[in-house]
């Protein structure tokens, strides 16, 4: 008799024990060696499942990617792609102020919510399925990448090429605040700005200088003032200055824009690029960075995938909602390609990208059962 995938013996304490090394292996995007140490941890866990693994060397100074094909009679064929990232926004040393710890029904740790918790849960579902001797209707491939937190500049091609081989894409990013899934995403555009002025001694010849910092600071208010209900602009990085007694001649900044429609995105990009000028005493250069495309909601394949997930959740005793969302993820790429993609089906929690990042522990088993149901029913 085949085991019921929704009743597999998931164990919260076992899952927390397995998650701990994932969280205590810090993996900030810009530290390739740290990200690769995290890839090593995941690589071992996948190899222990008997998966056929492939380490894909990083580029652009970033970490490696990891692809794994789960044991199956049709291993290697397209089927279900589990897509996740193992980089985080938290710098090395964050564990000193945000250690992996449990407090009642909450567990804390850097990257636990975004998105190591979801990745681990969906691997644990595979582990339990294999242990129960269940053969999923479709083969499963796992792809973990190193650069999602900076817009996926190095691995977008890899993700899109791999995703096109598969019928369904599962992205266990953290659930929306109400616990719901994501079935569409707004576009995300990044911009790199630089002002270049004229240096001088700040105490002796202040009037001779032209401050790149002051010019950029004035632009911050102008840029963030362009934010509206359906498009936002945020200056998230601002770097300048070496000596306080020198008028700074160079200042760099980075801007993130989110738009709900392609038309608004195009308008926002045009506004940002129009800010650039080479006239006057201070030059402003604006360069467009990486962009996540609009993933239009309500695509038939994605909605059919969501309907299955919703039915599984109903059997598990809770309702699953769905909506289009901001934030951006690698689901933007697969959804924009028209591939059936279900995003934000990972753990529930709060405080991602902050020193209060945490998950609700009871969501570990809940989401593992959802994962098992999806693996075992998709393609049946």
Image (cartoon, grey):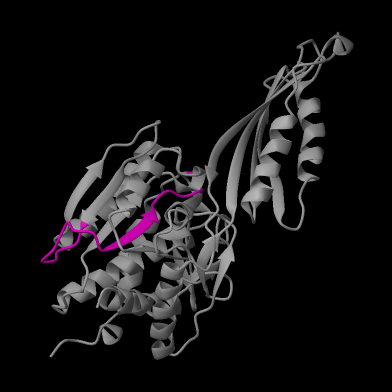
Was residue 79 drawn as part of the magenta stretch in this picture? yes
Q: Position of residue 147 (x, y in %)?
A: 43, 44
Q: Is residue 204 left or right of residue 79?
A: right
Inspect this view and state whether residue 346 appears: no
Q: Position of residue 105 (x, y in %)?
A: 49, 78
Q: Nearer the viewer, residue 233 or 166?
A: 166
Quadrant for the C terminus in the image: bottom left
Compared to residue 36, the image places residue 41 above or below, namely: below
Which residue reaches farthest right? 207
Q: Is residue 349 left or right of residue 265?
A: left
Compared to residue 347, the image places residue 339 above or below, namely: above
Q: Position of residue 304 (x, y in %)?
A: 41, 75
Which residue reaches farthest left? 73
User: Looking at the image, which residue is at 41% across and 68% down?
Assistant: 301
Q: Nearer the viewer, residue 255 or 205?
A: 255
Number of dots carrying numbers: 0
Q: Which residues are magenta?
A: 69-91
User: Looking at the image, which residue is at 20% across and 47% down?
Assistant: 54
Q: Nearer the viewer, residue 245 or 64?
A: 64
Inspect this view and state whether residue 333 appears: yes
Q: Is residue 231 left or right of residue 303?
A: right
Was residue 231 drawn as part of the magenta stretch in this picture? no
User: Looking at the image, which residue is at 16% across and 60% down?
Assistant: 48
| Displayed quadrant of residue 375 | bottom left
Q: Position of residue 236 (x, y in %)?
A: 65, 42
């Amino acid at each position: 008799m085949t085991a019921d995938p929704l009743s597999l013996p998931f164990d919260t304490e076992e899952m927390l024990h397995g998650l701990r090394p994932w969280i205590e292996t810090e993996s900030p995007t810009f530290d390739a060696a740290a990200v690769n140490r995290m890839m090593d941890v995941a690589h071992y866990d996948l190899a222990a499942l008997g998966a056929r693994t492939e380490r894909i060397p990083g580029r652009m100074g970033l970490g490696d990617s990891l692809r794994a094909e789960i044991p199956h009679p049709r291993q290697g064929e397209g089927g279900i792609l589990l897509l996740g990232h193992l980089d985080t926004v938290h710098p090395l040393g964050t564990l000193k102020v945000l250690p992996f710890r449990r407090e009642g029904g909450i567990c804390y740790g850097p990257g636990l919510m975004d998105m190591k918790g979801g990745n681990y849960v969906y691997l644990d579902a595979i582990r339990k399925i294999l242990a129960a001797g269940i053969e999923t209707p479709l083969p499963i491939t796992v792809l973990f990448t190193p650069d999602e937190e900076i817009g996926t500049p190095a691995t977008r091609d890899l993700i899109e090429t791999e995703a096109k081989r598969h019928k369904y894409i599962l992205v266990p990013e953290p659930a929306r605040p109400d616990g719901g899934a994501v079935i569409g995403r707004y576009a995300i555009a990044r911009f790199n700005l630089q002002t270049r002025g004229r240096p001088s001694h700040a105490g002796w010849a202040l009037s001779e200088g032209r401050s790149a910092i002051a010019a950029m600071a004035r632009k911050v208010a102008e840029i963030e003032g362009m934010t509206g209900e359906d498009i936002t602009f945020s200056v998230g990085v601002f770097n300048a200055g070496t000596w306080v007694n020198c008028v700074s001649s160079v200042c760099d900044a980075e801007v993130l824009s989110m738009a709900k429609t392609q038309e608004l995105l195009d308008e926002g990009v045009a506004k940002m690029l129009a800010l650039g000028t080479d006239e006057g005493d201070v030059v402003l250069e604006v360069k467009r960075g990486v962009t996540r495309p609009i993933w239009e909601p309500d695509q038939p394949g994605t909605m059919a995938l969501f309907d299955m997930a919703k039915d599984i959740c109903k059997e598990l005793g809770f309702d699953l909602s769905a909506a289009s969302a901001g934030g951006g993820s690698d689901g933007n790429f697969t959804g924009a390609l028209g591939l059936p993609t279900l995003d934000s089906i990972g753990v529930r929690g709060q405080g991602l990208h902050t020193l209060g990042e945490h998950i609700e522990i009871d969501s570990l088993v809940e989401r593992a059962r959802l994962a098992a149901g999806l693996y075992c029913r998709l393609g049946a």
